[in-house]
Image (tube, helix red, strand yellow):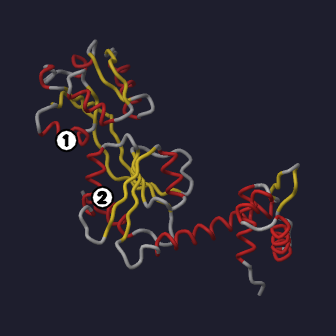
Amino acid sequence: MSILNFSHLRYFWEVAREGNLTRAAARLAISQSALSTQIRVLEERLGHPLFERTGRLLVLTEAGRIALEHANTIFAVGEDLVATLRAEGRRHILRVGALATLSRNFQIEFLKPCLGRPDLEIVLTSGSLPELEAQLRSLDLDVVLCNGLPQGASGIVVHPLAQQTISLFAAPHLGYVGSSIGDALNGQPVILPTRANNIRIEFDALCQRLSVKPVIVAEVDDMAMLRLMAREGIGIAPLPPIVVRDELFANALVEVVPLPGIRESFVALTVKRQFPNRAVKELISAAWRA
């Protein structure tokens, strides 16, 4: 049986990613001629050319694309092994990514079953969804928390965690308590999420159905800021209850009226791993039971 030399495969992988022999050789700290020799040896072993030259670029052949797909899988498993075992003998690390605009209250609720564990260190990173997806795929994150589904989620596993109904909330002194949706919104100042948020899309559709025209005084992409502006009495705001839980308890905000049919979905994103972080499974299971 022909045994594959993984050093040759690694050289091929670097060249395929760079698309240039000179840059790949510099990354690998070997000469360009030595790298070319290693690629030729791999091509002979596989029985197919892996590259064809187009100008100064090396373009993958069909066999090269197949080889690259397998190499990606092989080296991803290797990175997974290192990521899993490098914490052996010390406290385990749980690396969590969260959408920068995601409710802090929801993040705490999700992490609560693992908070304070002496055997676990939690590293929490915030960012945009594309940034977090990239870190998840490279195994720099174990799980990503967000509201809504990612785009182009090939290879990503989506775990639904919770759905929250949306209500209008306002500072008590504004006197909205007991108002209907129409009375609370028509011609009244409102603070809204930006149009990138599903709540905003559904809110606009609801207003159109009810023929109400609120006065938009602010558009905010951060739920924490939207909550603070509502608390200051700048206007009424559509929010999930978990976002304003503390304000409701302190009577800093009151629920005016629920908005029928509008919900926010919270999900956890993972990728299939050879050695998944056990804490992630525990947290997702706990969220399901809640």
Instruction: Specify the quadrant of the image occupied by residue 172.
Output: top left
Name which residue type carries label 2. Trp
Image position of 18 (left or right of 232):
right
Instruction: Specify the quadrant of the image occupied by residue 38.
Output: bottom right
* Residue 101 higher or lower than 190, as above or below: below
Inter-mark Cα distance, 1 to 2: 20 Å
For label 1, the residue is 245
Asked whether the beta carbons under mark 1 and mark 2 sit within 8 Å of each other, the answer is no
Q: Secondary structure at mark 1?
A: helix
Instruction: Give the image location of residue 239, x and y in percent.
Output: 28, 34
For label 2, the residue is 288
The foreground one among 247 and 208 is 247
Image quadrant containing the N terminus: bottom right
Tell me the residue at 62%/67% (across/down): 73
The foreground one among 61 and 101 is 101
The foreground one among 236 and 135 is 135
Judged from this view, the residue extending furthest toward the bottom is 1
| Precedes in sequence: disc 1 or disc 2 | 1
